[in-house]
Image: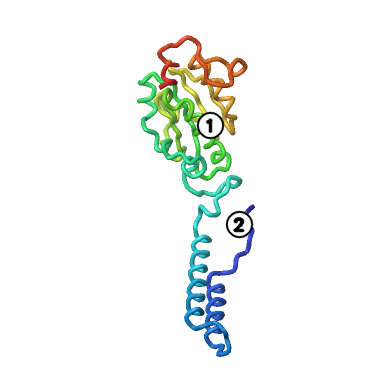
Amino acid sequence: MDFSRLQFPSVSSLLSFFVKQIIGKFKNPFSPIPPWRRLVSGGLMLVALASFSLMLGTPSALASLEDDRYDGNVFVLYAGNGSLVPPPVTLAQALKEKKPTLLVFYVDDSSDCKKHALTVSQLQAFYGRAARFLPIDIDVIPVKSSYEPTEPGYYYKGLVPQTVLIDQEGEVVFDRQGLVAFERVDDVFREVFNLLPRSESPDLKRYPINEFNSELSK
């Protein structure tokens, strides 16, 4: 439901209405409700009004996967995963570690990036121990005429979300723009870690252990 299309009464008009109701109750001498109960009732109505007004003023209450509004960091808000941001290491450090690295280029005010954040978080749940996950907010990429392979700008192609997987040897083995299914990236991770393909094993099962896929069992 798109809350932005709804027309809410102003807080001042609601406040005026509730105040009139409270005053009216106190002015009615024939009311069977004792004064102290009327006072409590009025106070509760004011508390409810205050809570309602706070809800209207809170962006997260109106957050939606279907729009391009800024609601907060997409990985924290929509994937519930604060461990992804900020990245724990730089790209240069990740490449030096000889670990597979997943670069995810994004912005916080994109509906596609909001949806893609959950896929990235699911991938991290399976491969986060053996690979580096580096979400890159494109707004922080410095503007330069050229970039080195150790810099995120070297791989960015101008659209978000963009998902790039770099293997242990520093070679790009996957590069897609737009929404990408979990299974599509998972298939490439399986190849990188020498795991059985999905057609043979829906679960992550290994070929004979080597130094890379052994990390997945830790």
* Residue 164 on image: x %, y %: 50, 26
- In the depicted view, which residue is nearer to us: 169 or 203? 203
* For residue 146, above or below residue 51: above
**Residue depicted at 43% across the width and 18% down the height:** 170
Q: How is the image coloured?
A: rainbow
**Residue depicted at 54% across the width and 88% down the height:** 27
Marker disc for residue 100: none
Displayed quadrant of residue 113: top right
- The residues bearing labels 2 and 1 have C-alpha atoms spaced at a distance of 29 Å
Check contact, mark 2 vs mark 1: CB within 8 A. Answer: no
| Direction top: furthest residue | 208
Displayed quadrant of residue 28: bottom right
Q: How many marks?
A: 2
**Residue depicted at 57% across the width and 43% down the height:** 111
| Direction bottom: furthest residue | 29
* For residue 66, above or below residue 14: above
- In the depicted view, which residue is nearer to us: 152 or 26? 26
* Residue 122 on image: x %, y %: 52, 32
**First of labels 2, 1 by sequence position:** 2
Mark 2 or 1, closer to the camera: 2
**Helix, strand, or loop for circle 1?**
strand
- In the depicted view, which residue is nearer to us: 200 or 178? 200
**Three-letter residue code for mark 1:** Gln
Q: Is residue 127 left or right of residue 21?
A: left
Instruction: Judge the density around disc 1: few (<14), some (14-19), many (≥20) Cα neighbours within 10 Å.
Output: many
**Three-letter residue code for mark 2:** Ser
- According to the picture, the residue beneath numbered tag 2 turns out to be 4
Instruction: Judge the density around disc 2: few (<14), some (14-19), many (≥20) Cα neighbours within 10 Å.
Output: few
* Residue 191 on image: x %, y %: 53, 16
Q: Quadrant of the C terminus?
A: top left
- According to the picture, the residue beneath numbered tag 1 turns out to be 162
**Helix, strand, or loop for circle 2?**
helix
